Image (cartoon, rainbow, N blue to C red):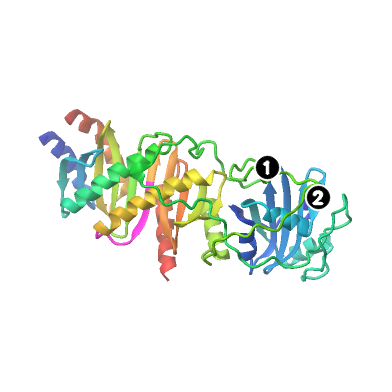
Amino acid sequence: MAVLKEILNKFLILNGVQAAMVVQENGEIIESMKSGIRLDEEMQGVIATLMLDSKATATSFGDAPLSMLFVEYADYFLIIGPVMEEFFLFVIAKNTANIGQITYAMKKNQEEIVSSL
Amino acid sequence: MMELLPEGKSIGWMQAPPQWIFSHTLRFVGIVRIVIQDGEGFILINKGKALTFYFKHGRIELRGNAALDYFNSNPTIEFNLSKYTPEEMAEAMKICHIESGEPRQEGRAEVPAAPPAVVAVSQAPEPAPAPMPIRSEPVPSPAAAVPHTDSPAVEGARPRETGPETGARSVPERAAVPDRQATYEAPVQPAVPLPATIDEDDIRIISQIKKLNGIVAISVFNDDRNIVLMGDVEIEPLLRIARSLLATTRKITPHLDWGQFVHMTLQIPEGNVIIAPYRENYLCLLTTRTINIGHIRRILRDLQVNGEN
């Protein structure tokens, strides 16, 4: 998992990114890198809710696969993107971060993440 | 008849109960073009006063109260609001043989097959009953959401900006084509009171968003019902998704100290569903995959900032 940490660290280098993690669709965190944010029980509950609910909602679209989930608040936003099968990349960033840069990094590093899992 | 009327400046197509028109046109001067099944008609409105009602299907014409009753017999109708300048309004009134902005007295008479002119209505409709709740079930839990097959046709759907061709699937089947033998019952009165939350400015804003490249449909909704929809999509499946997303945000927001909720976007291969707070209601946007999300984000943020001022 050291390799995975290295890959996730590439996201933390991006301006405004506070956390990058690989999670399972049940919300379990496989690996994470964070900076200035706590992944406490409450946050884990949020992650689990988002993963389960977004999958259920996408399923109600005729069993469509989830391409991305983006939730924005005044100060922060989060992006969830699929990596492979039941694994997803979960990024939390300040609202000053560049979304395009993050989503590009998600696509660019997807294969590397897959091979490290 | 309809083709003679001035085009006006279109504000947008939408679907709502007929009563919605009368409760949201107090400052509106222009024409409301209505499409029901294969027929079309119009209401000429001058600052809340409905001057005339007209509907035509094939060779059958309904005028005045007969047309109004037919509109009211449909829980939801599809219509377009087009603003008139004073000159255009005057021209439209001339074409409809209306001499002043005041509705003329007229009874509920049989409509002749080809009367010489549109008959003005006898009275303005009852004020502002609420739109019928399209769906009043409780918000479904996303975790319990059952897959269904009647998902919105994102790929096939397209903005309705042009002619009044039929095909709006949300137009109910019972809105059957009127004929001479049809009896027109009293207008259906929706039971739920209408919160005065959408005005002409809202419609203009929503219409402007709808016109953006990549927006398939836009809806203003709340927990009880769809308030207004612009776009040629089936509202119920879209609302189910929107309410699912909304339920998720309500679960997570209390646990996040991240400030005010701005929007949630669910991206699937067919397109995006976006929900965002809009005053005391919510917006739901259905977009293509090619949409510029950055542009939408800016608009949604601006809406919230303006809504607070």
Q: Position of residue B42 (x, y in %)?
A: 73, 55
Residue at 24% x, 60% y: name it: B257
Name which of mark 2 and mark 1 comes first in the sequence: 2
Q: Position of residue B142 (x, y in %)?
A: 36, 45
User: In this orientation, which residue lies closer to the viewer: B223 or B307?
Assistant: B223
- Kindly identify which residue carries mark 1: B165
In this rendering, does residue B151 appear at all? yes
Chain letter for mark 1: B
- Kindly identify which residue carries mark 2: B61
Q: Position of residue B136 (x, y in %)?
A: 48, 53
Give left or right: position of B254 versus B262. Answer: left
Q: What is the three-letter code of the residue carrying label 1? A: Glu
Give left or right: position of B234 versus A73. Answer: right
Quadrant position of residue B32:
bottom right
Circle 1: element type:
loop
Q: Position of residue A77 (x, y in %)?
A: 29, 52
Up-down: is B133 above or below B86?
above
Quadrant (top left, top right, bottom left, bottom right) of the C terminus of chain B: bottom left
Chain letter for mark 2: B
Quadrant position of residue B200:
bottom right
Q: CA distance from mark 2 to mark 1?
A: 18 Å
Residue at 32% x, 61% y: name it: B260
Region rendered in magenta: B256-265
